[in-house]
Image (cartoon, helix red, strand yellow):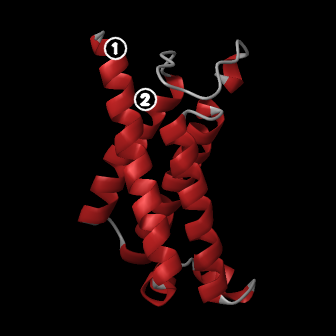
Amino acid sequence: MDTNKIRHLLGRIGVAMVFTIFGAWEIMKPAPWANYLPPFLATVGNPLTLITIHGAVMIIVGLAILTGFYLRIFAILAAIIILTIIITLIFLTGYADIVVRDTGLFFLVLSVAIDNERYLTLTKSKHYLLM
């Protein structure tokens, strides 16, 4: 098998695992995650509901990346989600080990987003954004 295909698939699997597992944790036990909610969002709605919605979005993004369904769009969305998490963590806790880990994940998500390899994907559009 071509090493580019293996690299591509391993990157997608890694990102999908993180998003899907964290999303499931947020849905199953939203209370601990409410501590990471930006303070201004607490005024928007019930924090536990917001965390549960975030968890559902994380699962959808993870599964889309795993299956390659509109891979580039969902990888860009994943990068935006991770970037907002990084910014929130810096704002709430300062520079911490979690920020370093999430920054590494951010760059992995970006590499999936810009990768032109499309091995075992559901969507094989020729349009750049839909690849």
Mark-to-mark CA distance, 2 and 1: 12 Å
In the image, is 127 to the left or to the right of 54? right
- The residue located at (35%, 70%) in the rendering is 94
Residue 95 picture location, percent across and down: 31, 64
Q: Amino acid at mark 2?
A: Ser
Which image quarter is the C terminus in? top right
Examine the rendered structure and indicate whether residue 116 appears above or below residue 106: above
Helix, strand, or loop for circle 2? Answer: helix
Q: Is residue 91 visible?
A: no
- The residue located at (51%, 19%) in the rendering is 118
Residue 2 picture location, percent across and down: 30, 9
Q: Which mark is residue 111?
A: 2
Q: Nearer the viewer, residue 16 or 43?
A: 16
In the image, is 67 to the left or to the right of 100? right
Disc 2 crowd, CA 10 A, few/some/many (<14, 14-19, 20+):
some
- The residue located at (47%, 78%) in the rendering is 36
Which quadrant of the structure image shows residue 70? top right
Residue 1 picture location, percent across and down: 28, 11
Q: Earlier in the sequence, mark 2 or mark 1?
A: 1
Q: Which residue is mark 1?
A: 4
Residue mark closest to the camera, 2 vs 1? 1
Q: Nearer the viewer, residue 27 or 38?
A: 27
